[in-house]
Every structure is written in C-alpha cells, then in structure tokens.
Amino acid sequence: MPLRLPPAHRLAQINHLSRTVSFGYALIVAVALAAERSLGPWTYVLALATFLLYPQAAYLHARLAHDSKRAEFRNLDADSILMGAWASHVDFALLPALGAVVAISLDNAVCGGLRLFGRGLVGFAAGAAALGALEGFRWNPDTGPLVSALAVVGILGYVTALGDVFHVQNKNLVHTRDSLRSSEAQFRFIAEHAGDLVAVIGADGILQYASPSYAEHYDPERSAPGRDWLELVHPDDRGKAGRFLAYLRASMKQDRAELRMAMAGRAARRFECQGNPVAETGGGLRMIVLVCREVAGRARDDGPAA
C-alpha cells in the first residue's frame, strides 16, 4: 500500500514551486560559472545536491513535520545559509551573489516581513562565514559575459515573477472586496423590503429566488426557481414588463415600472416594481433583484387573473 503523506502548509506548497524553479535556474548559473572558472568536479556535485535535490528535500521536510508552517520557515533559513555558502564557494562572484541575496531577501520579506528579512541576511552571512572558514576567503567579483547575462536575466525574471504574483493577488483581493460590497448592498436592499415581493432573476429572466411573500399570492410551483418571472405578470402587461427588464439589462441602472401582477384565482393587483441590476466583475449582468410593492389606494382590476 503506497505511503500517503499529509499535505504541506499552503505557504510550503507555494514556496515549493518557487524554490524548484529558482534553484533550477541557479543550477544553470552555477554550472556556467564553474565552467568559466574551471572549478573542480566537487563544485558540480555540490551544485546538483543544492539546486536540484535540496528543494525536494525541503518540501518533504515540510510535509513530514508536525508543524508544516514552522518547518517551511526553517526551510527559508536553510535557503539563506545555503546561498551564503555558495557565494563564498564561488569567491563572491558579484552578480550571482547579488542574485542570491535578492532572491532570499524577497522570499523572506514576503513570508515574514522585516523580521524574517533580517534573519535571512544573518543566515546568508553565517553560511558565507562558515564555508569561508573551511575553504578560505577569496574575493573574485568579476564574471564573464555569459554568467553575467544569466545572472541579470535571473534577477529580472525573479522580481518580475514575484510582481506578477502580487498583481494576481491584488486583483483577487479587489474582486473579493467588490463581491462583498455588492453582497452587502443586495442584502440591505432585500432586507429593507422584506414584506414586499422580492425576487432574484438571472439575465434570462428566470427566477433564482422568490421571497416567502410570493407564496401568499401565487401557487408555489409558479414562483419556484427555474420559472419565468414574466409568467407572474398579467398577460396584458407582459410586453411592458419585458421592456422593463430589457432596459435594466442594457442600462445597468435602477428603475421602476408599474405592472399588474396576475394573482392565483384573484383579481390582478397593481404593483410598483423596482429593479436593481447587479453586475459581474467583468461588467456583464449577474442578476436582477426585483422588489414589487402593491400600489396603495389604486383600484384593483375586476375579474380573476388570466
């Protein structure tokens, strides 16, 4: 029976994709730099372990840990230490080291604000100091055209990708805020007319909701969701009601119309119907909230409704 691991925290899931892609690109830069400087085979082995295997090991750590979120913060600490060690190993090659600092700083700032940002820099310095103490500190900031170009593209690509993530999140937040505001407005609109005939219809005029007050005047089947709202209007006024709905769809503005409603087995009554169109995020019509209130003091039509 296959072993089923618990899901990782959402932060670990997001960082897993980011870490896998960014470390994979860092592997290309590291290999190019090692080839440019004729570094030994140990550098290639270390690059494969760090940039190819480590991201998967970090994600596995987050999935196996009792506290997945805390484990992911530890992974971020490990990222910083490893990048600092790599910067020391390649003699602080300026652009690759700068790319590593930018990446870990952005990751830490996004995940934990200034506190984690500072902790990341400390971890980077600790990693550089530890490996420098073992291998010796050397300073060789210059890189060739290929490595420099790869490092610049990597920095720009990472910053752009992170900016795009923020853009999408901001759009989602705006959409959620607008939806909440719209829902709140519609709830208030309906609550203020709780005693009237309140209906929600789709862009096609089909009932999505009818308030309990409809049951006092209509057969429940006629006012059930899925029925055409126009069927509740007196036959002689259905053309007028259709034009009223068409105007609401086209204008996306509130409007009123006086209509005769066809009551079950009783004389038709005159109602003032207020229509309130609700827009989708993209601008199209989402639904129409209709509130119909009987016109006081008006004579009712003689005879049963058709």
Image: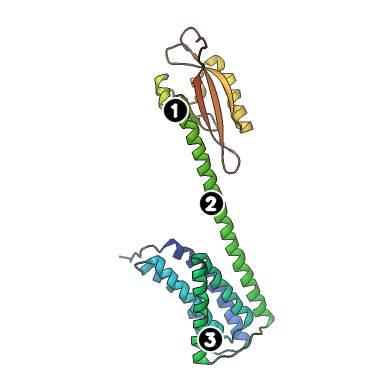
Element type at marker 2?
helix
Element type at marker 3?
helix
**Sequence-earlier tag: 2 or 3:** 3
Residue tagged by mark 1?
A: 194
**Sequence-earlier tag: 3 or 1:** 3
Q: In this figure, what is the number of numbered marks? A: 3
Q: Residues within 10 Å of mark 1 (few under 14, many from 20)?
A: some
Q: Which amino acid does label 2 sit on?
A: Leu
The residue that appears at 59% across and 39% down in the rendered structure is 284
Q: Which amino acid does label 1 sit on?
A: Ala
Q: Where is residue 188 in the image (x, y as percent from the top left)?
A: 48, 34
**Which residue appears farthest toward the top when viewing the image?**
302
The residue that appears at 52% across and 23% down in the rendered structure is 230
**Which residue appears farthest toward the left when viewing the image?**
1
Mark 3 → mark 1, Cα distance in angstroms? 74 Å
Mark 1 → mark 2, Cα distance in angstroms? 31 Å
Residue tagged by mark 3?
A: 43
Nearest the viewer among 208 and 137 is 137
Nearest the viewer among 31 and 271 is 271
* Residue 236 to residue 92: above or below: above
The residue that appears at 56% across and 54% down in the rendered structure is 170
Q: Nearer the viewer, mark 3 or mark 1?
A: 1
Label annotation for residue 173? 2
Q: Where, by quadrant of the figure, is residue 204 drawn?
A: top right
Label annotation for residue 112? none
| On-image quarter of the N terminus | bottom left
The residue that appears at 52% across and 28% down in the rendered structure is 290
- Is residue 19 visible in the rendered structure shown here? no
**Sequence-earlier tag: 1 or 2:** 2
- Is residue 23 visible in the rendered structure shown here? yes
Q: Where is residue 265 in the image (x, y as percent from the top left)?
A: 42, 12
